[in-house]
Structures are given as C-alpha cells and as structure tokens.
Image (tube, grey):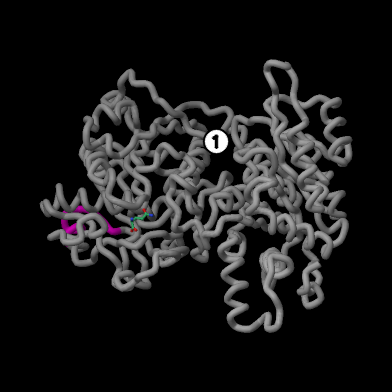
Amino acid sequence: MSPQKNSRKASRTKYVFITGGVVSSLGKGIASASIGRLLKARGLKVSMMKLDPYINVDPGTMNPFQHGEVYVTEDGAETDLDLGHYERFIDEDMSRANNATTGQVYYTVISKERKGDYLGATVQVIPHITGEIIERMLAVTRGSKQYDVVLVEVGGTVGDIESLPYIEAIRQFGLELGPKNCVYIHLTLVPFIATAQEVKTKPTQHSVKELREIGVQPDLLLCRTDRPLDRKVKDKIALFCNVGREDVFDVPDVDTVYELPLIFEREGMGKRLLDQLGLRAKDPDFSQWQSVVRKIKHPTGTVRILIAGKYVEVRDSYKSIIESFVHAGAFHGVKVELKWVEAEEFEHGEAKDLMAGCSGLLVPGGFGERGIEGKISAIQYARTKGLPFFGICLGMQAAVIEYARNVCGLRKAHSTEFAPTTKHPVIDLLPEQRGLKQKGATMRLGSYPCFLTRGSKAHAAFNTDAITERHRHRFEVNNQYREQLEQHGLRCTGVWPGGDLVEIVELQDHPWFLAVQFHPELKSRPTHPHPLFRDFVGACLNMTEPKAKEHASAKKFETVIEE
Ligand code: GLN
C-alpha cells in the first residue's frame, strides 16, 4: 500500500475504474463516457479522468496523424480527445486535473526528489509513482469540486508495459477506498469467428486473467461484440472470469455513439452499478438525450458540407468538428454528410468540381504550410459564389489572407507562419510569442472572453454581447491591417477585450461567411449544439434550389459523417 495513505484524507467520492483488454480501438472512451451519462442521468455529480501511459507531458506536441485531435479544456490544458467524449456525454467541463500522463507523473516525482521531498528514500515505481497517480485521481474531486462519482479510464490495453503502474495504482487505490466505494470495469472483445460460426470467449478470459495476476478483479465486464451474446456465452464468461452472471454486458455496434447510454440503461447497467457502489439516486431521466438520439437516427433530410483540411485521412484529428455537425444536424433534423478533401487538391483541381453538390465549406484549424494555398482558393470560391463558409482558427487566418489579397489588393499578403518575410503580414505572431523557445503548452490556450458586435451574424447566433471560447494558436490577425480589412467589408465582429485581438470576422453581404480564431467545436454538446455550427448548417440548408443545383453534379461522396 502507498506510504502516502495515512496522510491522505479518506475520499467520500466513489470511483469507477475502467480498463481495456485484448485490442485497442474498442471505444473505451465512448463506453466510459456512456457510463458517466448513466450516473449523470440519475442526478449524481459526476466527473471523469483519463490516465495516459505515454511519456509526453501532454499530447500538444504530437502530430495529429499520431494522436488525433488535441482537446483543449477551459483552463487551457492540451489533453486527450477522450476528454471531448466526456464533456459531450456528461455535460461537465473538464480541466487540467482530468488528464494525467506518465510524463506528468514522472515530472512531478522527479521535481519532488530534487527538492528533497523524499530525502533518505530510494524513489521507486511502487510506491512513489503509483502514489502520485493516486494523488492525481484524488485531485479531481478536491476543494470546491466535490463529486459523487469519478470515473477513471486507464489508457492502453492490459498487458502493455506502459500501463502497468496505472493498473497497480488503481489496485492500491481500490484497497484504500474499500468495497462498495469503487467498481472495476473491464472492456473486452468477444470476436465472432466466421469459420467456426461461433463467438469466442478465450481472449476475454486471458485478458481478465492478466488483470487478476496484477491483483485487479473486474466487477463488470463490457463485451464488445458485433452480435448479441446469448445467455450461455455470458454464463461462460462469468464463470471463467469470476464475475456475476448479471455483470456481463454486451457493447454492440451502434448507429450513433449517443445511443450507447440508452442501450446500457436498457440492459440494466445503471442499476447494477449503483448497487455495486452502494449508492442511491433518483430514477434516471433520459428524455432530452432520447430525443437527440431519435433525431440523429431519423433525419428528415441531408445537407452536404465540404471540409478542406490537412489531416483528413485521420478523422480523429477532427473528432469534435464531426460531433459538432452531428449535434447541429440533429437540431435541424437533418443528416450532415461531410465530404473530406485534402486542401492541396484545391491547388490542382477546379474548386467548382470539388465543391459540386456541397452546400457549404468548412476550413478547420491546422499547422504548417501544406495545403494553405488550397484553403485560400476554396475560401475564395465560397466567398465569390455565395456559398456558406465557416472558418476555424487557421481557417479564419486563411480567410483573412484571401480577403487581403483578392479584395484589399495586397497581393503579397500572408501569414508569417508560412512566409516570415512577407511584405504584408496580415497574420502575425503575438508579441509575447516571439521570444519563446519552448514548444510545449506555450500557445494561446484555453478560454478567453470575446465581445460581439450587435447586428452581426455572430451576435445573432449567440444572442448575447459577450461569450467565452477556447483557443489553441500562436498567430493572430495583425491589427495594423484591421482598418483596411474593415474598410473593404470584412467586419471584425468579435474581439477579445483584454488584448484587442480579432476573434471573429464575417461578411455582411453574403449568405453566411464567418470565421473564428477560437475552436467552437470544443464546446458543442448533443443537447446544446454550438450556435455557430447550428447557424452554419442552417445557412447551408437555406441554400436556394438554383444555387444548390449550380454546385450539384453526379459525383459520389466517398465518406459520410462518422459517429
Ligand atoms: N497555425 C495557426 C496558429 O498557430 C493556427 C492554429 C490552429 O488552427 N489551431 O496560429
């Protein structure tokens, strides 16, 4: 047991630990978030946490091809994309405390060692590293933040060398918490073997065996399967894995991930979890959630939107954008089909052909030069053809460059990110960014207020004078060009009062042309779609028939929105 135990105050919060087995990519984040929803629907105060076994301090320095989206929290932490699922499913803001990585844990322990906090001791994985992991699990629910239940998802798969200290930490912490105060859930795979025409339980047995070797006995088993498991199979799993018959649950493939909490509830998981945690709560209320799921599953129409991005092969890089379109689509009762195009294609092909059949263009955030000219061409097309356009972060910077070049006549306009010596740096580094040597966690990160101009599309969307939105960027609209841009019609309708920075630009005489420096996709939730995604989809739907036809062609859309 951890040596810190005696100095720790006993936690009144109950903990649910979620591990994964057999293979990765089983959807552990979604399953965990769905369990969070079961508890939230019962009026319990719930928070969630992700433990990431990699040695990076945070995913901020990782390539989107490696890691997918970096999810930024209100307090400016760059975190794992699972925190996005947590926020969307439990409708609670996450913070820096809700994601811990091996890099952070070691950083803290080594810093303490240098300060002399462990004087005399040999610093070891057990108890010092595991002790720090436990401290971080406790830190989620301290001070003003008191929760009934904290769900802790352990990243990786049981058996990975990297995740061992985390499994050991949840074992120790479980002992401290005591029975009825925590539950261990293991997500596993039950594959169907076509040649035998049977589902196989052996991988699950092995995975649980591996967990038990470390001293963790799962209480609930969640079995990913492409077909319902019959009673006999579940009984066999229960027997071999030492869990109750009623504690083996199917996790089926679903049309929309938002359906999963409803399926879990129908299977009785919520009630079972409450029993195991010794908790009482009111009856669950899923009415709003159910209505969103119904709308997602039964759309009354379709709208097609093109995304001109840089990491389009890895859809996880745009996870929150994809989900924001699901939410906005549900609001309008339509399915948003996304056509994914590498922005570079706009450098070689005709914008008209690429945009054929699409009612709107979204240019998302990104880093680095590749594809920037393609984004600018795509935006020029949308601007001049009256096609709804939504720019996010780099998408807004590209819109400003396009406008400066093609409307203000500043042919050499560019961002100093791509052309450091450009004659017209309409997008430039913030002064405080100039001297920075360190890359990690040094961007403009997290939530900042933004004042909106009355009478603008932005103001109409939010229906308020001041908002807060989350950021992740180093470059900004250069205020030296602001007047010129405005004089030519690009309105700056959202401004950060603290530093007089442009946060939103838009065009008045256009069906919908609006771009933002922040990341609205991080704040969209199924039951409250983000106002800008909502209005952008609305504008795309409003494309008049002839206009839509102008872009229509028989081209097939290779990809449909993923849920
Ligand atoms: N590369 C740009 C910047 O750092 C945009 C970043 C983004 O799109 N998130 O400002």
Seen from the viewer's position, the closer of residues 488 and 544 is 488
Q: Secondary structure at mark 1?
A: loop
Residue 83, percent across and down? 58, 53
Q: Is residue 234 visible?
A: yes
Say which residue appears at 43% left-offset and 54% top-offset.
519
Q: Is residue 548 above or below residue 118?
A: above
Quadrant where the image shows the N terminus = bottom right
Q: Quadrant of ligand 1?
A: bottom left
In this picture, residue 105 sits left or right of residue 322: right
- Which residue: 40% across, 57% down? 518
Closer to the camera in the image, 128 or 323: 128
Residue located at (76% from left, 74% from top): 4
Q: Quadrant of the C terminus?
A: top right
> Where is residue 409 shown, x and y percent of the image?
10, 52
Identify the image quadrant of residue 385.
top left
Quick one: 48 or 436, which is closer to the camera? 436
Q: Which residue has dot 1 on it?
A: 563
Spot occupied by residue 56 in the image (x, y as percentages of width and height): 52, 59
Looking at the rendered structure, the kind of residue marked 1 is: Glu
Q: Residue at x 72, y 31 (%)?
A: 190
Tell me the quarter of the picture where residue 243 sits: top right
Part of the protein shown in magenta: 484-492
